[in-house]
Amino acid sequence: MKSSPCELMQSLSLFSQKYLSAYQEKYQHLPLIEKDEQWPSPCLSTDYDDNNQYWQPCEINKPISFVNVEEALEITIHPDFKTYFTTLYSDTLDASCDEGALSLLFAWSESDFQRLQENLIGHVLMKQKLKQPLTLFFALTDDDNMILSLNNDSGEVWVEKVGSKAHKKVADSLTSFIHMLIPRIP
């Protein structure tokens, strides 16, 4: 199932706002990340202390795309997956749903988006080698061997064991899945 890009973008924005609100309610400030001059991001804000900075998800303003990946692999990536990873820059956002705890993956910056593309290429090539239906990962679970992925043909959200076929459908679309999530603050 395909979501409208606008609906998915709104769902992601709303979830990130809920996450920030829950975080600020618990800690009375924005999320923190360890300072790393080698890993800049538009998400970064002011310093918290000598070792940490505030950060928050931010909209991606400069267009980025998966065209190079699609051309290199001769595939068409599901529009929901492309919308998901080209809407926000962010660190992982922890959440929970009926299936358990998870961490939504995002690109931290434009250079991290390139790294994401490289990982995606490796994942797609593995799926092709194993002759498995094409899925595209977007979240990690609290079980290191399980990921959440989008079925590239249908747009459905599935749980799959790394290196195996997706085995449990959890939502008809990425938008409906995001709506099910509850922020999980560490």
Image (cartoon, helix red, strand yellow):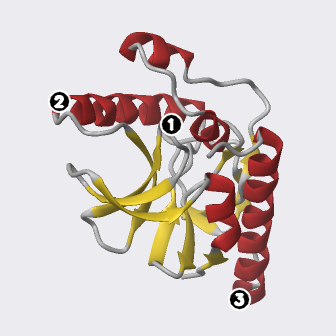
Q: Quadrant of residue 130?
A: top left
- N-terminal of the two: label 2 or label 3? 3
Q: Could you say whether the residue bearing mark 1 is in a helix, strand or loop?
A: helix
- Observer able to see residue 87: yes
Which of the two marks, 2 or 1, is nearer to us in this view?
2
- N-terminal of the two: label 2 or label 1? 1
Q: Is residue 21 left or right of residue 148?
A: right
Label 1 environment density (alpha carbons within 10 Å; few <14, some 14–19, many ≥20): some
Residue beneath disc 3: 26
Residue beneath disc 2: 129
Instruction: Identify which residue, 86 or 57, lies in the foreground.
Output: 86
Q: Which amino acid lies under the numbered mark 3 shown in the image of this protein? A: Lys
Per the rendering, the mark at residue 159 is none
Counting from the top left corner in percent of width and height, residue 44 is at 69, 51
- Circles 1 and 3: CB distance less than 8 Å? no
Residue at x 29%, y 32% (from the top left corner): 122
Q: Is residue 70 left or right of residue 178?
A: left
Q: Which amino acid lies under the numbered mark 1 shown in the image of this protein? A: Asp
Residue beneath disc 1: 112
Residue at x 24%, y 29% (from the top left corner): 128
